[in-house]
Image (spheres, rainbow, N blue to C red):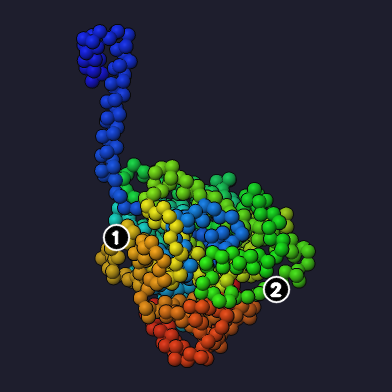
């Protein structure tokens, strides 16, 4: 080919009396033009073969409160996540389960968590069986369910009677990637002398076995954010799975920090198949800002002194900002809360230092998370995929008020001194008073299913090709609506009641893509009269239109029986703060909603416990 070009070029140039010295240069130019032509041809072929369906990036934060983003009223600077809202839409009335694994089960399957395998957290199912007290009924040897007859919906892993989002998208030609917290692969079994816990890893329930082509996941519900310290904390004794390989945290890279590492890994996955012409579904299930509150020192230093004024001052500022942003349209009166051991002015100087630093650590984690979400978005722009990518950002439940829970493990040690807080080897949480700030303007927080603060999550959606911000929407949405919406975006049909030759539970969620595509505001997605409900650990709610019936015990240290907790009725059209129980004024509505709830219990095979959750 080269010789032929050289000869042809030489004869042509001699005809026009071009000096022979230029022959090599001109030949090189012709070769370059030929290469460009071939490259253009290859690129045209690649473009012709490229699947034009959108990529889908689903980002989930862990224990992020409703008001913890600056676009939702926070003083924490989150410009990268906020930028998604300026080219997308804020959904102000999105609801998840009140704790993490039930939310994740419904997210992945579009099915109520009682049917999808996480009727309750596996940790709690086993604990109830072991305790075996009247308050734990019907769990325990003295009651109905022991380790040898746990119902399918409470097994601790995704049910085989479900089809997952990555399975359905993979079948339809998508690459599927996942990083971060999974928390859906336990098998609850009786402890033995060799294995002292009831939590066993079920390998065929890990992400790789439920549809993810590539995955790097924390298997447990919580773990340290740095590589294990010496000696380790109990939160360092956790497990990860890279595809089908399960390994202990001690094998993590020495420079591991969760949010940065997961971001790097997801970028690596996205880049690995860029030339395939296929779209991708990427699930970034970050473990931040879940306790233990840990962050790089520079992020911590940036928050120094920002919380010295205390809970009430910060909450008041957030509420004022939320009002200016139009986020309080259905909140005539924010919930005042004030739950916790002490008010700010009752703390001594040392207590104030610890409380302020705890919140500084939390804010550092949120700020760090925002920066790495920004890295993901920037990478999509760099590789030319941003415009064709749907991006969703959400949290898995309300703000977390509980202390860092750790099983006692011999040989471990925790250093929560003021100087060590936030570093590897520490295990700090920020407590109920800061969690109230994160849940503003709502009642209570994570773990309280009957309260808005437990189930309300920020949701931001940027559609592919969307350039402008669209009006925020107060339409009621459930986590079970995400799967139908994502499938709709990808042009994939819902699976119905059969999948790959087996019976499965059918999603009752609805796609809100048609509403998102409207340029104007919209106030509803579910049809009028639709019943939306949930139950977890003996606390419940049922919603029909603007009415919410809630059975939720107040926070306390002494467990209570569910039968002793009254139902309360709230008008959500003006009282999402849940400040006025109007059940006495509307007995007919109460009766209707109680009937609706009984139907929900039957349809979703809910096993109601004797106690009602009133603390964690």
The C terminus sits in image quarter: bottom right
- Front residue of 291/322: it is 322
Residue lying at 62% horizontally and 53% vertically, measured from the top left: 295
Residue lying at 34% horizontally and 64% vertically, measured from the top left: 514
User: How many neighbours does mark 2 have within 10 angstroms: few (below 14), some (14-19), or many (20 or more)?
Assistant: few
Looking at the image, residue 76 sits to the left or right of residue 606; the answer is right
| Residue wearing tag 1 | 492
Percent position of residue 304, x then y: 69, 54
Looking at the image, residue 552 sits to the left or right of residue 208; the answer is right
Mark count: 2
Looking at the image, residue 505 sits to the left or right of residue 551; the answer is left
Q: Can residue 49 be seen in this view?
A: yes
Residue lying at 41% horizontally and 66% vertically, measured from the top left: 521
Residue 369's place in the image compared with 90, above or below, is above
Q: Point out the tag, 1 or 2, that comes first from the N-terminus.
A: 2
| Secondary structure category for the residue under label 1 | loop
Residue lying at 41% horizontally and 48% vertically, measured from the top left: 386
Percent position of residue 604, x then y: 39, 77
Q: Which mark is drawn over residue 525?
A: none
| Secondary structure category for the residue under label 2 | loop
Looking at the image, residue 499 sits to the left or right of residue 324; the answer is left
The N terminus sits in image quarter: top left
User: How many neighbours does mark 1 have within 10 angstroms: few (below 14), some (14-19), or many (20 or more)?
Assistant: some
């Amino acid at each position: 080919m080269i010789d032929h070009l050289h000869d042809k070029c030489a004869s042509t140039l001699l005809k026009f009396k071009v000096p022979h010295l230029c022959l090599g240069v001109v030949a090189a130019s012709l070769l370059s033009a030929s290469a460009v032509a071939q490259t253009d041809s290859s690129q045209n072929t690649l473009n012709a073969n490229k699947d034009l369906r959108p990529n889908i990036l689903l980002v989930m934060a862990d224990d992020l409160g409703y008001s913890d983003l600056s676009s939702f009223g926070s003083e924490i600077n989150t410009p990268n996540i906020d930028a998604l809202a300026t080219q997308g839409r804020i959904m102000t009335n999105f609801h998840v389960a009140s704790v993490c694994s039930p939310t994740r089960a419904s997210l992945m399957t579009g099915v109520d968590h009682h049917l999808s395998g996480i009727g309750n957290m596996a940790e709690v199912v086993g604990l109830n069986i072991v305790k075996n007290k009247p308050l734990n009924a019907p769990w325990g040897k003295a009651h109905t369910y022991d380790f040898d007859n746990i119902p399918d919906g409470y097994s601790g892993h995704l049910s085989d009677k479900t089809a997952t989002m990555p399975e359905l998208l993979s079948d339809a030609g998508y690459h599927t990637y996942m990083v971060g917290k999974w928390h859906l692969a336990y098998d609850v079994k009786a402890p033995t002398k060799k294995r002292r816990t009831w939590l066993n890893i079920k390998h065929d329930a890990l992400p790789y076995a439920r549809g993810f082509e590539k995955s790097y996941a924390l298997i447990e519900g919580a773990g340290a954010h740095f590589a294990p310290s010496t000696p380790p904390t109990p939160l360092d004794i956790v497990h990860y799975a890279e595809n089908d390989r399960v390994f202990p945290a001690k094998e993590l890279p020495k420079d591991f920090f969760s949010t940065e590492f997961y971001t790097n890994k997801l970028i690596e996955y996205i880049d690995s198949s860029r030339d395939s012409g296929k779209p991708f579904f990427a699930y970034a299930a970050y473990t931040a800002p879940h306790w233990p509150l840990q962050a790089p020192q520079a992020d911590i230093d940036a928050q120094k002194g920002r919380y010295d004024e205390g809970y009430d001052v910060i909450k008041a500022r957030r509420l004022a900002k939320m009002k200016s942003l139009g986020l309080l349209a259905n909140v005539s009166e924010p919930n005042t809360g004030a739950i916790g051991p002490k008010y700010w002015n009752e703390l001594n100087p040392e207590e104030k230092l610890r409380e302020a630093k705890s919140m500084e650590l939390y804010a550092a984690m949120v700020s760090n998370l925002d920066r790495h979400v920004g890295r993901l978005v920037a990478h999509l722009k760099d590789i030319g995929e941003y415009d064709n990518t749907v991006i969703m950002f959400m949290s898995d439940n309300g703000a977390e008020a509980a202390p860092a829970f750790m099983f006692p493990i011999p040989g471990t040690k925790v250093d929560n001194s003021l100087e060590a807080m936030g570093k590897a080897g520490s295990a700090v949480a920020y407590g109920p008073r800061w969690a109230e700030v994160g849940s503003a303007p709502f009642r209570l927080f994570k773990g309280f299913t009957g309260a808005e603060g437990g189930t309300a999550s920020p949701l931001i959606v940027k559609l592919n090709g969307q350039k402008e911000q669209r009006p925020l929407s107060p339409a009621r949405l459930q986590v079970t609506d995400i799967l139908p919406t994502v499938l709709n975006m990808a042009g994939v049909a819902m699976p119905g009641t059969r999948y790959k030759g087996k019976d499965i539970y059918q999603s009752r969620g609805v796609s809100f893509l048609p509403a998102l595509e409207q340029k104007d505001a919209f106030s509803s997605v579910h049809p009028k009269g639709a019943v939306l409900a949930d139950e977890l650990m003996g606390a419940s709610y049922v919603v029909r239109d603007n009415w919410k019936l809630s059975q939720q015990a107040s926070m306390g240290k002494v467990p209570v029986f569910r039968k002793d907790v009254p139902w309360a009725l709230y008008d959500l059209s003006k009282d999402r703060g849940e400040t006025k129980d109007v059940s006495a004024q509307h007995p007919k509505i109460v009766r209707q909603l109680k009937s609706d709830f009984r139907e929900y219990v039957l349809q979703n095979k809910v096993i109601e416990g004797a106690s009602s959750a009133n603390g964690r």
